[in-house]
Image (cartoon, rainbow, N blue to C red):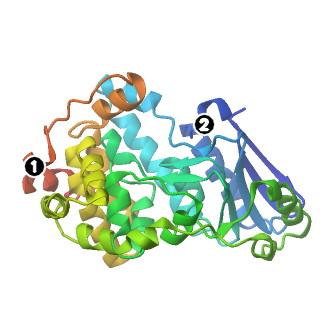
């Protein structure tokens, strides 16, 4: 059983149940979560939704990409496009859900996990929470509506997180707008029991304790200084000239990722920042993900990061300095009849 969906007391409950796979989201799990939300939307017995996960290591480490890899590497790009279309529809429904949506994120919450948790109304982290958008490392751009969260983060933290894939602990996740409340893990069971019994979401705020300090606060001026440029070429230039510990680490992180993904990510985030809606974010992301396997580095990125971990990816464009404006335009231009 990949998912445990049920009604308990006043709550609709969704528990991800693949701890050995770090609760990675399969295509069917996305469809089942969507169906539950559709059922509960107008159900008077359901006052709120609670989504959590089995195990300590991860709430959800991302999408289950084995089948995406298998189909795309065989030249079938339609499966991935359908997967993303349906997953993105779920992300929009979560963002627009009319009832409180409480997400409890222990351990790793990445990629697709961000999509099913971080668009909720009440997002809870604990001592071991690690949240990230690492898509540039596998030949995608931050998606599942993550570009909207990045666009809304303070200053240029969004561009920094989206291109480098830097992980956020609980304090940084709250500071960056990916989470709302810090609640020690030992208190989660009693909180869930209260929510189920009363249906009163104010119990979340009462259970919250002060968040750990966010290291990003101290790095904000560095981040804004280097990541405010419109193009990655200018970002690289700025980081190279600074020669600080922060800038050298960021430079190293950027150069490990897919060059076309890193180059497109700030443009997606900047476009999303102007309109600031989940629908526009998903549409912008889909322009890239639709093309990612056929024209981008998705297949090679998955092979390097997941399938054959000793493999160093051979990107279609060898390095960041070689990406042209027309390369970026090719990945981000409107899809016409195939638009989301």
Query: What's the mark number on residue 321?
Result: 1
How many neighbours does mark 1 have within 10 angstroms: few (below 14), some (14-19), or many (20 or more)? few
User: In the image, is residue 105 above or below residue 81?
Assistant: below
Residue 125 position in % (x across, y down): 65, 60
Q: Earlier in the sequence, mark 2 or mark 1?
A: 2
Residue 159 position in % (x across, y down): 32, 64
Dot 1: element: helix
Quadrant hosting residue 58 = top right
- Residue 335 can be seen, yes or no: no
Which of these two is toward me, 11 or 205? 205
User: Extreme front residue here?
Assistant: 244
User: In the image, is residue 150 above or below residue 330?
Assistant: below
How many neighbours does mark 2 have within 10 angstroms: few (below 14), some (14-19), or many (20 or more)? many
Which of these two is toward me, 1 or 205? 205
Direction from residue 203 to residue 128 in the image, left or right: left
Residue positioned 52% across, 64% down in the render: 172
Direction from residue 281 to residue 101 in the image, left or right: right
Residue positioned 23% across, 40% down in the render: 296
User: In the image, is residue 68 above or below residue 216?
Assistant: above
Residue bearing the label numbered 2 = 22
Which of these two is toward me, 208 or 146? 208
User: In the image, is residue 30 above or below residue 243?
Assistant: above
Direction from residue 337 to residue 240 in the image, left or right: left
């Amino acid at each position: 059983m990949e998912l445990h969906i049920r009604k308990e007391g006043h709550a609709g409950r969704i528990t991800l149940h693949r701890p050995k796979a770090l609760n990675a989201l399969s295509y069917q799990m996305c469809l089942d979560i969507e169906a539950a939300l559709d059922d509960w939307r107008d159900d008077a017995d359901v006052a709120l939704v609670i989504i959590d996960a089995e195990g300590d290591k991860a709430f959800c480490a991302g999408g289950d990409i084995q089948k995406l890899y298998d189909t795309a590497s065989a030249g079938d790009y339609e499966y991935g496009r359908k997967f993303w279309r349906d997953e993105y529809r779920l992300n929009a429904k979560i963002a627009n859900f009319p009832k409180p949506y409480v997400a409890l994120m222990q351990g790793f919450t990445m990629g697709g996990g961000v999509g099913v948790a971080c668009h909720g109304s009440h997002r809870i982290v604990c001592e071991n929470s690690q949240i990230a958008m690492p898509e540039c490392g596998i030949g995608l751009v931050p998606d599942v509506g993550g570009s909207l969260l990045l666009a809304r983060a303070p200053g240029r933290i969004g561009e920094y997180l989206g291109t480098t894939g830097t992980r956020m602990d609980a304090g940084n996740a709250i500071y960056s707008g990916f989470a709302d409340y810090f609640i020690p893990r030992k208190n989660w069971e009693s909180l869930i029991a209260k929510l189920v019994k009363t249906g009163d979401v104010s119990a979340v705020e009462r259970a919250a304790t002060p968040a750990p300090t966010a290291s990003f606060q101290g790095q904000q001026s560095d981040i804004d200084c280097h990541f405010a440029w419109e193009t990655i070429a200018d970002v690289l230039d700025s980081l190279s000239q600074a020669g600080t510990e922060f800038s050298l680490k960021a430079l190293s992180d950027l150069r490990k990722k897919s060059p076309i993904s890193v180059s497109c990510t700030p443009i997606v985030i900047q476009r999303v920042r102007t309109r600031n809606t989940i629908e526009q974010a998903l549409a912008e992301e889909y322009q890239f993900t639709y093309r990612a396997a056929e024209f981008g580095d998705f297949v090679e990125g998955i092979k390097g990061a997941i399938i054959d971990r000793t493999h160093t990816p051979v990107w279609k464009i060898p390095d960041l300095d070689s990406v042209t404006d027309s390369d970026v335009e090719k990945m981000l231009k409107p899809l016409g009849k195939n638009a989301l």
